[in-house]
């Protein structure tokens, strides 16, 4: 994912587009995001809904936490962890996630380069490792990046 981050920072430096930005920046035609403060876009392809509430005692015992998010209707979305298409868009969804998982979604039509780094603890030691491309198709079965 480091290559995706580098590209987001390049776009910020070259074009002035923020790396972390409100959802309306990329989805201005969906007014429900104009005042949204509980999720953000990380670059143009990744939507993040952070865990903002303290877990209830039962959830804490199960090492789970509640997160609520809304995915823009004008795009197809994939869960970053499961790689499955999210079926509900345009309305609030509440999920209970394990402590080590976040609510991260990839916009359809994106290609995410992933650096293979299973044995690396520092970027420079695995800088020349292989890349894996994760392709997330849009409604037209296309992707670019």
Image (cartoon, helix red, strand yellow):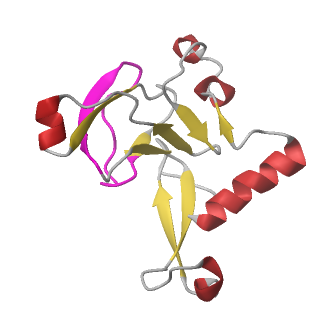
Viewport quadrant of the N terminus? bottom right
Q: Position of residue 33 (x, y in %)?
A: 55, 18
Q: Position of residue 83 (x, y in %)?
A: 34, 54
Q: Nearer the viewer, residue 30 or 98?
A: 98
Question: As drawn, is 36 to the left or to the right of 97?
Answer: right
From this view, report whether residue 141 is shown above or below residue 52.
Answer: below
- Name the residue located 85 percent from the left edge and 40 percent from the top edge: 16
Per the rendered image, the range of residues in magenta is: 79-99
From this view, report whether residue 71 is shown above or below residue 86.
Answer: above
- Name the residue located 55 percent from the left edge and 85 percent from the top edge: 130
**Secondary structure, magenta segment, majority class:** loop
Residue reaching furthest to the right = 14
Viewport quadrant of the C terminus? bottom right
- Name the residue located 68 percent from the left edge and 27 percent from the top edge: 25
Q: Position of residue 20 (x, y in %)?
A: 65, 39
- Name the residue located 58 percent from the left edge and 37 percent from the top edge: 41
Question: As drawn, is 143 to the left or to the right of 106?
Answer: right
Q: Nearer the viewer, residue 25 or 9?
A: 9
Total count of labels: 0
Q: Quadrant of residue 42?
A: top right
From this view, report whether residue 83 is shown above or below residue 117.
Answer: above
Q: Is residue 86 magenta?
A: yes
Q: Nearer the viewer, residue 63 or 134?
A: 63
């Amino acid at each position: 994912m480091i290559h995706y981050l580098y590209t987001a920072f390049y776009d910020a430096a070259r074009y002035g587009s923020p790396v972390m930005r409100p959802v309306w920046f990329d989805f201005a035609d969906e007014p429900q995001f104009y005042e949204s403060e509980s999720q953000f876009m990380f670059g143009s392809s990744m939507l993040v809904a952070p865990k903002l509430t303290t877990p209830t005692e039962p959830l804490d015992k199960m090492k789970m936490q509640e997160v609520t998010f809304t995915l823009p209707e004008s795009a197809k979305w994939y869960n970053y962890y499961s790689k499955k298409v999210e079926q509900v868009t345009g309305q609030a969804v509440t999920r209970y996630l394990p402590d080590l998982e976040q609510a991260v979604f990839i916009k359809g039509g994106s290609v995410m380069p992933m650096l293979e780094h299973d044995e690396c603890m520092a970027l420079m030691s695995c800088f020349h490792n292989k890349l894996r491309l994760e392709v997330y198709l849009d409604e037209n079965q296309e992707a670019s990046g």
